[in-house]
């Protein structure tokens, strides 16, 4: 999916919500455990109940790889079920030398048919360039939402800036905002504003709203741009809103509440 279509979907749905598909067997509603493929049945119910309210889905590979070959089969079934109607992000956090990175890119783009892959840029351009394909995206880990992220990402370099800003500047010459995004946590508003100043046109993938305590309005105040420029991800607060047989109704309500808040923000910014 290219930039133009992504932005078109945001305006059409009045939403910049991304739903993280991170299924944990220990947290799934018990009745699904009787199914042949409980994770797929769970994912399918979440997708069916939220697909009109979000523009992207983001499976985290760890939750599928843990299950071995069956988990990877479930991931493929899930992506095929969504098809090309949504922006599909492989939250894989891959990084390796060029030849290996190309194999990862081939896997996620050619076999699974993802639109984007999260990539660590800290091995340099070799680890990123194989993911920079036409209508495909590398989403670089820049300022993440985990508690210890600042131990490394905020190290002040000889430029006088934190390392994460140096990475933004350096990576911006590898490609353009049309196939590169940045991961910036919702719990880091200072970083959101600083990175937006350095990268006015890039989209940000923003985790941390919901279960991690990030605030949607704060994120938008610090990082919105003239094309929205944000994909705000929510995972646990959507997936595990309820564990009864009608769990997906509660997931839908969470997404509806967020979509309505996003619609107001988009209108306030004169984008719809």
Image (spheres, grey):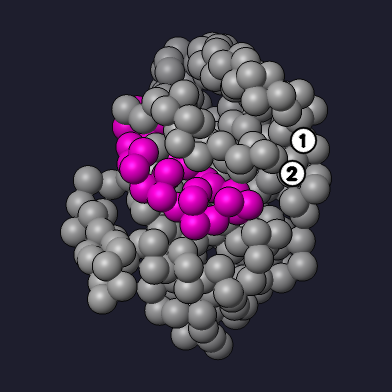
Is the residue 220 above or below the residue 250 in the image? below
Q: Is residue 264 left or right of residue 193?
A: right
Q: Residue at x 77, y 67 (%)?
A: 134
Q: Residue at x 42, y 44 (%)?
A: 192
Helix, strand, or loop for circle 1?
Answer: helix
| Tags 2 and 1 touching, CB below 8 Å | yes
Is the residue 102 above or below the residue 116 in the image? below
Q: Quadrant of the C terminus?
A: top right
For the question of whether residue 157 can be seen, the reply is yes
Q: Measured from the top left, where is residue 81 in percent x and y?
A: 72, 41
Helix, strand, or loop for circle 2?
Answer: helix
The part of the chain drawn in magenta is 187-212
Is the residue 252 above or below the residue 215 in the image? above
Find disc 2 in the rendering and name its residue. 6
Is residue 154 covered in magenta?
A: no
Q: Is residue 140 left or right of residue 177?
A: left
Find disc 1 in the rendering and name its residue. 9
Q: Who is closer to the viewer here, 69 or 198?
A: 198
Q: Measured from the top left, where is residue 10 in percent x and y?
A: 72, 33
Is the residue 256 above or below the residue 176 in the image? above
For the question of whether residue 59 can be seen, the reply is no
Q: How many numbered discs, if any?
A: 2
**Mark 1 nearby-residue class (10 Å; few <14, some 14–19, many ≥20):** some
């Amino acid at each position: 999916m290219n930039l133009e279509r992504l932005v078109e979907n945001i305006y059409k749905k009045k939403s910049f919500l991304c739903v993280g598909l991170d299924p944990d067997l220990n947290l799934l509603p018990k009745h699904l455990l009787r199914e042949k493929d409980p994770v797929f049945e769970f994912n399918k119910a979440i997708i069916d109940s939220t697909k009109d309210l979000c523009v992207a889905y983001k499976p985290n590979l760890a939750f599928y790889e843990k299950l071995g070959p069956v988990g990877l089969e479930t991931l493929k079934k899930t992506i095929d079920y969504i098809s090309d109607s949504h922006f599909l992000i492989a939250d894989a956090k891959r990084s390796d030398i060029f030849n290996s990175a190309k194999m990862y890119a081939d896997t996620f783009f050619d076999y699974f048919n993802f639109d984007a892959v999260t990539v660590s840029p800290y091995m340099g351009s070799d680890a990123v360039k194989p993911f920079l394909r036409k209508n495909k995206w590398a989403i670089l880990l820049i300022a993440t939402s985990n508690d210890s992220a600042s131990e490394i990402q905020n190290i002040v370099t000889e430029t006088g800036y934190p390392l994460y800003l140096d990475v933004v500047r350096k990576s911006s010459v590898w490609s353009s905002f049309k196939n590169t995004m940045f991961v910036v946590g919702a719990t880091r508003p200072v970083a959101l504003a600083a990175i937006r100043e350095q990268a006015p046109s890039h989209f940000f993938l923003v985790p941390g709203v919901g279960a991690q305590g990030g605030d949607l309005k704060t994120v938008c105040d610090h990082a919105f741009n003239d094309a929205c420029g944000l994909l705000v991800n929510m995972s646990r607060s959507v997936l595990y809103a309820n564990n009864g047989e009608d769990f997906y109704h509660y997931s839908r309500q969470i997404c509806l509440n967020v979509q309505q808040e996003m619609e107001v923000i988009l209108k306030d910014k004169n984008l719809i």
